[in-house]
């Protein structure tokens, strides 16, 4: 008698799809260790008095090194059928003329180093030029006067020390170079913080995005905005009389493309903050953020991108309004 099950074949064993191996940015580990070492050396030289402001600059380098070491453990995103990686020069130029293509490429190849360094240098160099043009004496005296009138008034001896030491430090070459370098370091941390907020926003709106994708998007959203803003501010800084430039507000930018021209910051500080948020560059950055999140994310719709961009815009606006309400004297 034949076996009735002789045609039966056992099903193949189940297969499990494994996620492709993703690389880690190990170069950040080595760069981070190098920055920590350099930071320690600069800090020591600053403590012994060989470099003015070296302690702060060295501390900033060390903090950035720690950030890089932490970043080196975050794996890069895995994108199926990735396009060829755009060159750094092509990405830097393309963000001004074809941002959609750049953000799509950043989705598979998140790159950010050049953009962050350029923006940080622009911020630092602009502040250095601003201090030279307006003078350290005027800026420090104005700041101390407003601190004396503020709710957090320091002791009189501390204020007097700030007037004398602050001016000397701002005039020192080592301090000026350190301020520029700290601006670059600060921008790395600023992009990291904003990228984290964008990632949380995308996830809250139901999208999907990798942290490196949000970091690259934020870095390249900031680049054209800063280049345009600081480029115009440089021109105004040297064309306008220094006496007509606010010693604190002007340190950020001098572009008058918003409704802040219609409101007095001294008489209506909160309304002035709202008015300055309504401008050409502000809406350009808002649009670029929405496009960047949509094209740079793994799964982010247009409505989700705009939702996150507008939500963060409103949150930062509310934060600025709160500061203006608490410290109105600094805007006068």
Image (cartoon, rainbow, N blue to C red):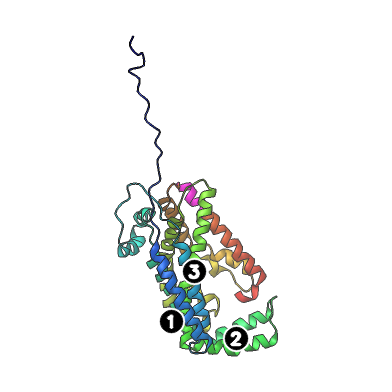
Establish if 172 lies above or below 282.
Answer: below
Q: CA distance from mark 2 to mark 1?
A: 22 Å
Closer to the eye: label 3 or 1: 3
Q: Is residue 240 visible?
A: no
Kindly check if marks 3 and 1 are in contact, taking CB atoms under 8 A apart as contact. Answer: no
Closer to the eye: label 2 or 1: 2
Q: Residues within 10 Å of mark 2 (few under 14, many from 20)?
A: some
Residue 66 image label: 3
Residue indicated by mark 2: 141
Q: CA distance from mark 3 to mark 1?
A: 38 Å
Q: Is residue 262 visible?
A: yes
Residue indicated by mark 1: 238
Residue at (29, 54) in percent of width and height: 84
Q: Which residues are magenta?
A: 301-308
Which numbered disc, 3 or 2, marks the residue that appears first in the sequence? 3
Residue 126 placement, left or right of 169: left
Locate the N terminus by quadrant: top left
Locate the C terminus by quadrant: bottom right
Instruction: Kindly state the secondary structure of the residue where label 2 is placed.
Output: helix
Pick the front one: 28 or 168: 28
Q: Main secondary structure of the magenta part?
A: helix
Pick the front one: 316 or 211: 211
Residue at (54, 90) in percent of width and height: 168
Closer to the eye: label 3 or 2: 3
Instruction: Indicate the position of residue 191 as horizontal and vertical percent values.
Output: 48, 64
Instruction: Kindly state the secondary structure of the residue where label 1 is placed.
Output: helix
Which numbered disc, 3 or 1, marks the residue that appears first in the sequence? 3
């Amino acid at each position: 008698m034949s076996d009735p099950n002789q045609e039966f074949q056992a099903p193949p064993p189940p297969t499990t799809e494994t996620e492709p191996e993703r690389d880690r940015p190990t170069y950040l580990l080595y760069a981070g260790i190098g920055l920590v070492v350099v930071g320690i050396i600069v800090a020591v030289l600053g403590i012994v008095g060989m470099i003015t402001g070296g302690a702060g600059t060295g501390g900033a380098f060390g903090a950035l090194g720690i950030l890089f070491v932490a970043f080196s453990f975050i794996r890069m995103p895995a994108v199926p059928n990735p396009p060829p990686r755009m060159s750094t020069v092509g990405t830097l130029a393309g963000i001004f003329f074809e941002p959609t293509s750049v953000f799509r490429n950043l989705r598979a190849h998140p790159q950010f180093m050049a953009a962050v360094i350029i923006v940080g240098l622009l911020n630092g160099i602009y502040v250095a030029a601003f201090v030279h043009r307006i003078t350290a004496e005027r800026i420090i005296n104005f700041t101390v006067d407003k601190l004396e009138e503020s709710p957090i008034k320091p002791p009189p001896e501390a204020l007097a020390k700030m007037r004398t030491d602050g001016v000397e430090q701002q005039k020192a070459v080592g301090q000026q170079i350190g301020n520029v370098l700290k601006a670059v370091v600060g921008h790395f941390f600023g992009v990291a913080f904003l990228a984290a907020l964008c990632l949380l926003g995308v996830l809250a709106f139901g999208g999907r995005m990798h942290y490196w994708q949000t970091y690259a998007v934020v870095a390249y959203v900031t680049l054209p905005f800063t280049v345009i803003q600081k480029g115009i501010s440089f021109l105004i800084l040297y064309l306008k009389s220094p006496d007509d430039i606010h010693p604190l507000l002007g340190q950020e930018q001098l572009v008058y493309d918003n409704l802040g021209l219609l409101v007095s910051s001294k008489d209506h500080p909160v309304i002035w903050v709202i008015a300055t948020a309504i401008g050409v560059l502000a809406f350009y950055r808002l649009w670029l953020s929405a496009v960047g999140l949509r094209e740079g994310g793994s799964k982010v719709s247009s409505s989700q991108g705009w939702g996150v961009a507008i939500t963060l815009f409103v949150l930062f606006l509310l934060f600025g309004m709160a500061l203006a309400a608490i410290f109105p004297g600094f805007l006068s």
